[in-house]
Image (spheres, grey):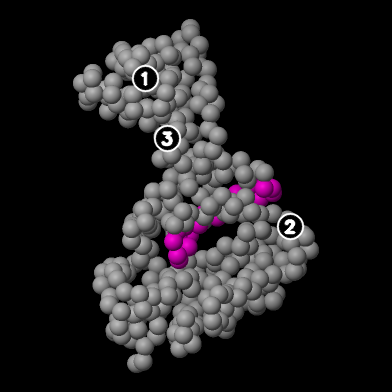
Amino acid sequence: MEEQTLRYLRGRFGDHYRRSEITPPPDANEREWGYVPWTEGPGETYVRHKSLLDLGEISEFLARERPRHVYFSAGRYENPSASTMSGKTWRSSDLIFDLDADHLPAAEPDDTYAEMLAKCKDALLRLLDFLEDDFAFEDLTVVFSGGRGYHVHVRDEGIQGLERDARREIVDYVRGIGLDPDSLIRKEMRGSVTARVLPTDGGWGRRVHRKLIDFVDELETLDEADALDRLKELDGIGDGRAKTIYGAVQQNREAIENGNVEAGGVGIRTLVDSLVTEVVETENAPIDEPVTTDTNRLIRLPGSLHGGSGLAVQRLDRDAITDFDPLVDAVPETFRSHEITVEVTDGGRVELDGDSFTLEEREVTVPESLGVFLMCRGRAEKGQE
């Protein structure tokens, strides 16, 4: 990044912070703080092991230092500015989940930035289903990271003291790691008979049962030959088992809807076993696992700007997530005021603020929001006005 570009971005980040009200996280004075300043040359300088006593009031610090990135810790400490983790003396930590579009299994190499973010939102909604329905967490803060994804901060009292191993169990659950079909089945009295049942009221059992019903619906649209072929596409199902399962599906639809995996003998249970892997692949939450297990993790400050995009790190109301468009709603108002000149160094198509641009590698005049976005992402340098 050229010196002129760096100075421009630092100045405009400062303008943004002077116009913004930043709400710090709970117990902000017990957390470690870190930031990345705008520095010349390759690489970044990471300043950390700071407390609010070192930085001062957060809004004043941001307006004064105009950092490229700013972070606070999930953990709370007795001495957050100590230079070693052992010296900080850990007290408790939020539970943090990080979804990054670059790491999604569904992401394709030729996806646009907008397409990656859309897929990441789908993963976010799956994650929230786990956190709200399966774990019944109540104190959740959802944040657009300003870059490639979303963060979820869980601050329920019951998770604050969890150490790494316990957090690892939560990770394994939402990722579906090591999910055993036998663990999903429970015994219930159905009339005078004890039945083995796939739960339909929640958890992975509900997800597998929902997939089972969808699959049965699909089979019922096919003739017998095609239905048998479809069954044989599943792992572990050959000719004989396919015929057994098909017969069980034809005769026991009501029992299947009620979760009874013993309906029709071994057929439905075999089908459930075959579907579990597919359900885990499509319905797990592909979080960045080390973030959640790390009780000392630094995470982006909501309300700050992301120095790799110029977009806002933005808190989201739960009922606003579905309609949230990060490439429109996270564009800071500060950067919507006028046009600027930039030298495009990496051309191509860009979607931002409800518009689409096809840029050539030359000097152009563009809306400032687009110019800041390009410069932050290393695709342009500041031009002469």
Check the picture and name the quadrant holding the C terminus: bottom left
- For this orientation, the residue located farthest to the bottom is 385
The local crowd at label 3, few if under 14, some if 14 to 19, many if 20 or more residues have their Cα within 10 Å, is: some
Residue 209 appears in the picture as rendered: no
- The quarter of the displayed image where residue 343 is located: bottom left
What's the distance in space between the residues labelled 2 and 1, CA to CA? 55 Å
Q: Position of residue 311 (x, y in %)?
A: 42, 70
Q: Is residue 353 left or right of residue 96?
A: left
Q: Magenta stretch: give its range.
A: 143-164
The vertical placement of 237 against 78, above or below, is above
* Secondary structure state at the residue bearing disc 1: loop
Residue carrying label 2: 90
At label 1, counting other C-alpha atoms closer than 10 Å, the crowd grade (few under 14, some 14-19, many 20 or more) is: some
Instruction: Name the residue rendered at 39%, 48% in the picture.
Output: 106
Mark found first going from the N terminus, 3 or 1: 1
Residue 90 shown left or right of residue 206 in the figure: right
Identify which residue is drawn at 48% across, 73% down.
307
Cα separation between marks 3 and 1? 20 Å
Whether 122 is drawn above or below 250: the answer is below
- Residue that label 1 marks: 238
Of circles 2 and 3, the one toward us is: 3
Task: Using the image as rendered, state which of residue 7 and residue 76 is in the foreground.
Answer: 7
Q: Position of residue 212 (x, y in %)?
A: 37, 27
| Residue kind at label 2, given as amino acid type | Trp
Residue 179, image x, y percentages = 53, 32
In the picture of the structure, the residue carrying the numbered disc 3 is: 279
29 to 383, vertically: above or below? above
Is residue 102 on the magenta stretch? no
In the rendered image, the residue lying farthest to the right is 87
- Amino acid under label 1? Gly
User: Residue reaching furthest top?
Assistant: 192
The stretch drawn in magenta includes residue 154: yes
